[in-house]
Image (tube, grey):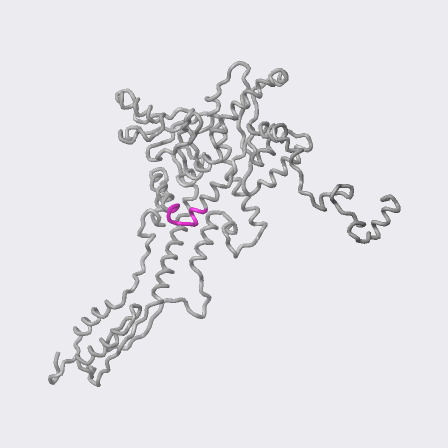
């Protein structure tokens, strides 16, 4: 547009230059990334929780996603899964104690037979993995894989499994072997391979859902009251995880936006609301300014006056740390004391102790369930016959938080004649089958009672011991009390 031969700005010119100059400022678009992710969206989580049976897989995948991406959720799962120490003892049962003295040799033989198998199972390591899987998925469909000197629990893909029945108070499950491709079946345990071949060799008479036998099935469930489906125990905290992710993204975006600035160059207008500067001069000055600006600063040219409108909280009010608030609400929603994870705002030792006791109580149900599963496997491994003594495994209620208290409890009971010496040893980490062997090794083989002696020092030597200097030899004067003792004979 020209006025008396001079090119002036029109509305189209301003719009065009606004668009062009806006490219110089890379603004961050705020959006809810976690809500865009369906797996961790509060909306979808709440919808799935209303129909958990039909959304079992969705809830399981959401829990897995949170475990991979959210540190608080991961720490919660790992804390609970690593809490038990899996200390155990072997208790005899089905024994005629009236003739026990006649069968001591058999009891000892059978004890070491059980102990050797349980030691091979490497329970502290295997069960921590099983428990972690259980807390993430709500259930662990495990298959026992036993070698000559090895043992492991293979976790099946839960999408291929379903609960089938109860045996000896523990769950057994079925596997949809028809969905396992032929090119990967070799990677599965032998028992699954046998079920797979049995189905494909006789599809007309064999169901596609094959039951895993009780001697190889290790199915641990977070909530035993749910017989028809499984549910991750901490799935209800995922909306809080979503909030935490949202606040983290918003805080990062806000911090990035705070680094950006914008220079608004106002073109003066005359009384007729027309620019008093021609087009070429405006562009010249604008280009001079824009060429000397850093990337974090943009520039625009406009005839309008600018008013900065911010969305920050009022400076007259206390600014809330949204991330810290979301973290605290997560731990509160998970019913775990945040002091365990280094929260400096909560320093109540009493509340921490009671909270840990509650966490231990929740874990005990899983410990007892795992014990029943192992005892069921032991019944298959060592069937009753003749004079054979049968043993059951009992996990002690020992965790990393109470191990010292439990050790003291078993030790004090043993001093009063209670049969808790093996429980005391197990609490210290000496497994039952190693108890006698370690005792023989220390006393008879290495004679440690006579070969291991404390370091010689004045605090460990008496006055009669050779090597300890007397006060006469050192030139020191005896104390009044020492002199009196010599005169009175110590009375």
Q: Quadrant of the C terminus?
A: top right
- Is 194 on the left-hand or right-hand side of 83? left
The reply, left or right, for residue 256 in relation to residue 127 is left
Up-down: is 252 above or below 15?
above
Answer above or below: position of 8 versus 48. Answer: below
Give the left or right position of residue 390, taking residue 296 as reference: right
Estimate the x, y position of residue 104 in percent, counting from the top left: 61, 19
Q: Residue at x 45, y 47 (%)?
A: 75
Q: Position of residue 95 (x, y in %)?
A: 58, 19
Name the residue at the left extreme: 5
Give the residue displayed 41% in from the left and 36% down from the top. Answer: 139
Name the outermost residue toward the right. 487
Residue 68 included in the magenta stretch of the image: yes
Res 7 → quadrant: bottom left
Q: Position of residue 417 (x, y in %)?
A: 68, 30
Q: Which residues are magenta?
A: 66-75
Residue at 71% from the left image edge and 43% from the top image edge: 460
Q: Residue at x 17, y 74 (%)?
A: 13
In the image, is residue 415 above or below residue 308?
Answer: above
Tell which residue pokes out farthest to the top in this image. 386
Which part of the image, by quadrant, shows the N terminus?
bottom left
* Residue 32 % position (x, y): 33, 56
Majority secondary structure of magenta residues = helix
- Please state which of residues 53 and 454 is positioned toward the viewer in this rendering: 454
- In the image, is residue 70 part of the stretch drawn in magenta? yes
The image shows residue 490, relative to residue 139, as above or below, that is: below
382 or 354, which is in the foreground? 382
């Amino acid at each position: 547009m020209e006025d008396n031969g001079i090119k002036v700005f029109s509305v189209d010119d301003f719009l065009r230059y606004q668009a062009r100059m806006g490219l110089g400022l890379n603004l961050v678009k705020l959006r809810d990334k976690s809500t865009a992710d369906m797996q961790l969206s509060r909306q979808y989580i709440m919808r799935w929780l209303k129909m958990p049976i039909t959304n079992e897989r969705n809830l399981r995948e959401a829990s897995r996603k949170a475990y991979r991406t959210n540190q608080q959720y991961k720490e919660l799962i790992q804390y609970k899964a690593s809490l038990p120490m899996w200390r155990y003892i072997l208790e005899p049962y089905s024994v005629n104690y009236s003739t026990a003295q006649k069968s001591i040799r058999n009891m000892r033989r059978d004890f070491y037979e059980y102990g050797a198998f349980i030691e091979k199972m490497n329970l502290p390591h295997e069960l921590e993995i099983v428990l972690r899987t259980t807390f993430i998925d709500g259930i662990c469909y495990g298959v026992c894989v036993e070698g000559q000197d090895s043992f492991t629990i293979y976790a099946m893909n839960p999408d291929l499994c379903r609960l089938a029945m109860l045996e000896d108070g523990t769950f057994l499950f079925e596997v949809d072997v028809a969905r396992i491709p032929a090119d990967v079946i070799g990677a599965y345990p032998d028992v699954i391979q046998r079920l797979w071949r049995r189905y494909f060799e006789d599809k007309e008479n064999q169901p596609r859902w094959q039951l895993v036998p009780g001697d190889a099935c290790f199915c641990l469930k977070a909530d035993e009251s749910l017989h028809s489906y499984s549910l991750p125990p901490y799935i209800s905290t995922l909306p809080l995880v979503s909030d935490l992710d949202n606040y983290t993204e918003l805080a990062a975006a806000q911090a990035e936006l705070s680094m950006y600035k914008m220079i608004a160059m106002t073109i003066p207008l005359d009384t007729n609301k027309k620019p008093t500067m021609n087009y070429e001069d405006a562009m010249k000055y604008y280009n001079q300014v824009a060429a000397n600006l850093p990337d974090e600063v943009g520039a625009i040219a406009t005839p309008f006056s600018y008013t900065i409108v911010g969305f920050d909280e009022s400076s007259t009010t206390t600014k809330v740390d949204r991330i810290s608030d979301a973290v605290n609400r997560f731990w509160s929603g998970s019913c775990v004391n945040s002091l365990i994870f280094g929260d400096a705002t909560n320093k109540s030792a009493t509340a921490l102790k009671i909270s840990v006791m509650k966490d231990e109580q929740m874990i005990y149900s899983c410990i007892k369930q795992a014990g029943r599963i192992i005892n069921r496997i032991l019944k298959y491994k060592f069937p009753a016959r003749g004079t054979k003594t049968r043993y059951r495994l009992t996990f002690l209620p020992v965790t990393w938080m109470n191990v010292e208290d439990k050790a003291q409890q078993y030790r004090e009971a043993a001093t009063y004649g209670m049969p808790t010496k093996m429980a005391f040893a197990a609490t210290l980490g000496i497994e039952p089958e190693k108890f006698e062997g370690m005792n023989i090794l220390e006393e008879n083989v290495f004679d440690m009672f006579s070969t291991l002696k404390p370091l010689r020092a004045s605090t460990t030597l008496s006055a009669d011991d050779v090597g300890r200097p007397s006060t006469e030899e050192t030139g020191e004067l005896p104390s009044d009390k020492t002199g009196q003792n010599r005169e009175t004979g110590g009375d």
